[in-house]
Image: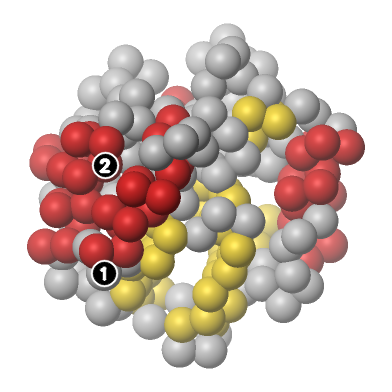
């Protein structure tokens, strides 16, 4: 199964050339401020893509997935033929996915959680049999370095990833650390498509599911 990973398109998805594949994965921040018209435009974009499977999580910019517009936003994704995950999972062709939009507190954005016990409660939900983990933010020390050289990933998430050992852990959030890193049997993917200046820079990442 061929995967295509995207993240942090921030309503600039029309600039992205999406390669063919079997499963499209988007790791959040599909919008700029989470307005429903942005989510609708994104859902139309997703609907036109030929991928058999499409899995989406929200990010810290996607406010409508956490506030009173939550039901409408999720329905827009579903009508696009995609699966929306929020601290939940799905299985596709024998591959177990789990997705969560939360990240350590970052200004007054959506899906913020305090480091430590509050965010750990979300990671505790990740099943032991997870093959592909989707989070919006990175684990600590892995593709999480800002332009100032600060590591801003989640320590509790790193602990859980070491415990579960998914084959793939895909995320975004830290635009300037986009890339792929294989470590301790897990392929880590920061799939951010925009750079720090919110300009399209990084093409989608293609990966054949490891056997």
Write down the quadrant of residue 51 in the picture: bottom left
Which of 68 and 185 lies nearest the eye of the viewer?
A: 68
Is 109 rendered above or below residue 128? above
Decide: few, some or many residues near mark 2? Use Cα within 10 Å; few <14, some 14-19, many ≥20.
many
Query: In this orientation, does residue 17 appear?
Result: yes
Looking at the image, is mark 2 or mark 1 earlier in the sequence? 2
Q: Position of residue 7 (x, y in %)?
A: 38, 44
The quarter of the image holding the C terminus is bottom right
Query: In this orientation, does residue 188 appear?
Result: no
Residue 189 appears left or right of 107: left
Which of 107 and 163 lies nearest the eye of the viewer?
A: 107
Is 208 rendered above or below residue 28? below
Q: Position of residue 18 (x, y in %)?
A: 19, 56
Q: Which residue is mark 1?
A: 81
- Residue drawn where x is 49% and y is 34% of the image: 67
Decide: few, some or many residues near mark 1? Use Cα within 10 Å; few <14, some 14-19, many ≥20.
some
Q: In terms of secondary structure, where does tag 2 sit? A: helix
Residue 39 disc label: 2
Is 105 rendered above or below residue 140? above
Residue 168 appears left or right of 124: left
Outermost residue toward the right in this view: 117
Q: Position of residue 160 (x, y in %)?
A: 80, 54
- Residue drawn where x is 56% and y is 15% of the image: 108
Which of 32 and 132 lies nearest the eye of the viewer?
A: 32
């Amino acid at each position: 199964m061929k995967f295509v990973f995207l993240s942090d398109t921030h309503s600039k998805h029309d600039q992205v050339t999406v390669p063919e594949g079997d499963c499209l994965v988007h790791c959040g921040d599909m919008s700029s401020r989470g307005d429903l018209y942005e989510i609708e435009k994104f859902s139309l974009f997703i609907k036109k893509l030929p991928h058999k499977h499409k899995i989406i999580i929200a990010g810290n910019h996607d406010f409508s997935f956490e506030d009173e517009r939550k039901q409408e936003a999720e329905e827009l994704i579903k009508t696009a033929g995609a699966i929306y995950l929020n601290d939940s999972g799905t299985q596709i062709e024998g591959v177990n996915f789990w997705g969560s939009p939360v990240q350590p507190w970052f200004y007054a954005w959506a899906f913020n959680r305090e480091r430590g016990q509050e965010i750990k409660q979300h990671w505790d939900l990740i099943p032991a049999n997870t093959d592909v983990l989707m989070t919006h933010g990175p684990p600590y020390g892995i593709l999480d370095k800002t332009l100032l050289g600060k590591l801003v990933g989640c320590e509790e998430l790193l602990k859980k990833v070491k415990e579960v050992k998914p084959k793939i852990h895909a995320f975004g959030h830290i635009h300037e650390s986009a890339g792929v890193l294989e470590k301790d049997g897990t392929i880590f993917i920061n799939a951010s498509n925009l750079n720090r200046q919110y300009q399209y820079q990084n093409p989608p990442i293609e990966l054949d599911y490891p056997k």
